[in-house]
Image (cartoon, grey):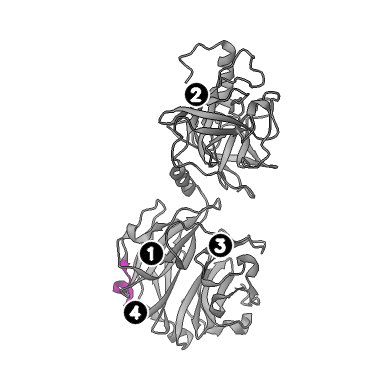
Amino acid sequence: MFSSRPRPSWIAAALAAAIGAGLLTSTGALAATGTPDASDRFAHTAQITTGAEGDARGCSGTLVAAQWLLTSKSCFAATPGEAVPAGKPARAAKARLGSTTYDIVDLVPRTDRDVVLARLDKSVAGVTPAKIASGPAAAGTALTAAGFGRTKTAWVPGKVHTAAFTTTSAAATTLALEGGQSGDAICQGDAGGPVVNAQGDVVALGTRSWLAGCFGTPATETRRAAEAARVDGLAAWVMDVRAAAPGWRTQAVVQTDKGLYQGARLADGGWTGFVDVQSKTGDIGGVRVSAIAGIDDTSHVVVLGNDGKLRHTIRKADGTWGAFGDIGSMAGVLTSITHVSAVSIGTDLHVVVAADGKVFHTVRRGDGNWTHFGDISVVAGPIGGVGSVATASVGGELQVISVSGGKAFHTVRYTTGHWAEWGAVAWAAGTTGPVTSVSMAGIGGDAHVVIATDNGTRQYHTIRKADRNWEPFGELKGPLGTITAKSVAAASVDGELQLTAVTSDGKVVHTVRHADRTWANPTAAPLGTIGKPAAISMAGTL
């Protein structure tokens, strides 16, 4: 942007420092005057330091997901203009948000602009990530830049500062900005900081300027032009990067009044968008019941179509789907199906179905072949009137719960293939009201069971421990809040219990039971415009 203009030697040096070290940004206040942001509107702005003490450089960044910063590639280049490879930063890098410091452990650079996604070593709590703008800032748009760079009077301010700018023009990947004449400037240390519109959405990242008004810049320099790297429209790229990052994911399929949709809660705690499953697998005329199970990095989805047929499909790690296959043609046809559950044990997919009031079981082997459906009552004892089922993989064993007449019954398929007799869960874990929804998940040697009772107005959790003893049912008002649950779903994900409930007012409430037995605060999964949810199923994948 400045290459065609005469540039005194001190400006060239300052520009090189700005490009390599970063630019300042914050709200309302004037960056060059040193007034800090007092509104917390820019709490998502990070102070980034690269290199060792004595050779450290500073820049800024923006939290766009719980474990991800959007910032400038130049912050991580050994010399200005040098390419920044993907992966671990070449120089040690840290980011501070609020009073907490995080290590930057991974970089994913853009090839077309001075932008990089930086992954933190752990998720940031208590800070709302910034939203990326969906459209560009037109010429004449008023913008605010924020960062931790120099002010008019300080080399390294302790708080984020802001500066007011106006867009003068836009190129494919950059914005040209003009600062106000009252001291507004982008300075060294501000590179990678957010440039936001009036709605607070990030439209660009500060990259370089003439540094007028910045500490150490001669008073004779009065040019307040700056350049920023555009990030509007990069939300999909950010999501693709996050979805491809290593770590466990919570896969979910949600049935709504519009169809069946799949989405995932990522390792960083954020959710992907939800996609229409039938748009990927082919239209089967609608879905009544669905279940999902994870095998390594793939998701296996089993559905009961509106035509009464059971079908199976696989979603690969790259997001591609296979066509639905007819389970009945391979495992035998069942009639009057009311519910289905699925879980993986090794590379085998175990499917349990409630049909004609009975419980049936089949296995899809790792080689893709199916065993014939077997009536569990033949081996576990007679039980009738079954309307719903749940499954869990626990220490290589298949555990099953069926609900008949509002009561839950439990059995185990041992690794030898033999089955235990049905036992009433109430005898072991305590009496509750009539069960209307059930789910379970295996963590280590324990089976976690979650139920909704009394038409969904109460929810409970219990554990069948590895020693085969049961913990008493405990109510879930704390973890879930006061809700009416139409459907509950549990999944084992990276040694923790993930729990969701579809509520009567059309939400999906999510919480996590950590390994230390504490529960996370409940949050609502962002469903978007997929319709009113009726049921959900979850599973963990790598």
**Upstream in sequence: badge 4 or badge 2:** 2
Residue 403 appears left or right of 27: left
Q: Which residue is mark 3?
A: 510
Question: Which of the two residues, 75 or 349, is positioned nearer the viewer here?
Answer: 75
Q: Which residue is mark 1?
A: 258
Q: CA distance from mark 1 to mark 4?
A: 26 Å
In the image, residue 539 lies in the stretch drawn in magenta: no
Q: Which quarter of the figure has residue 57?
A: top right
Please tell me whether mark 3 or mark 2 is closer to you in this view: 3
Q: CA distance from mark 4 to mark 2?
A: 65 Å
Q: Secondary structure at mark 2?
A: loop
Q: What amino acid is found at the position of numbered circle 4 in the picture? A: Leu
- Placement of 40 over or under 262, stated as above or below: above
Q: Which residue is mark 2?
A: 81
Say if mark 1 contacts mark 2, CB within 8 Å: no
Q: CA distance from mark 4 to mark 3?
A: 33 Å
Say if mark 4 contacts mark 2, CB within 8 Å: no
- Placement of 385 over or under 279, stated as above or below: below
- Residue displayed at 67% across by 62% down: 518
**Upstream in sequence: badge 1 or badge 4:** 1
- Residue 31 seen in the current view: yes
**Upstream in sequence: badge 3 or badge 1:** 1
Magenta span: 325-334
- Residue displayed at 50% across by 24% down: 81
Q: Secondary structure at mark 3?
A: strand
- Circle 1 residues within 10 Å: few <14, some 14–19, many ≥20: some
Give coordinates of residue 327: x percent, y percent: 33, 71
Q: What amino acid is found at the position of numbered circle 2 in the picture? A: Gly
**Upstream in sequence: badge 4 or badge 3:** 4
Q: Which residue is mark 4?
A: 334
Q: Secondary structure at mark 4?
A: loop
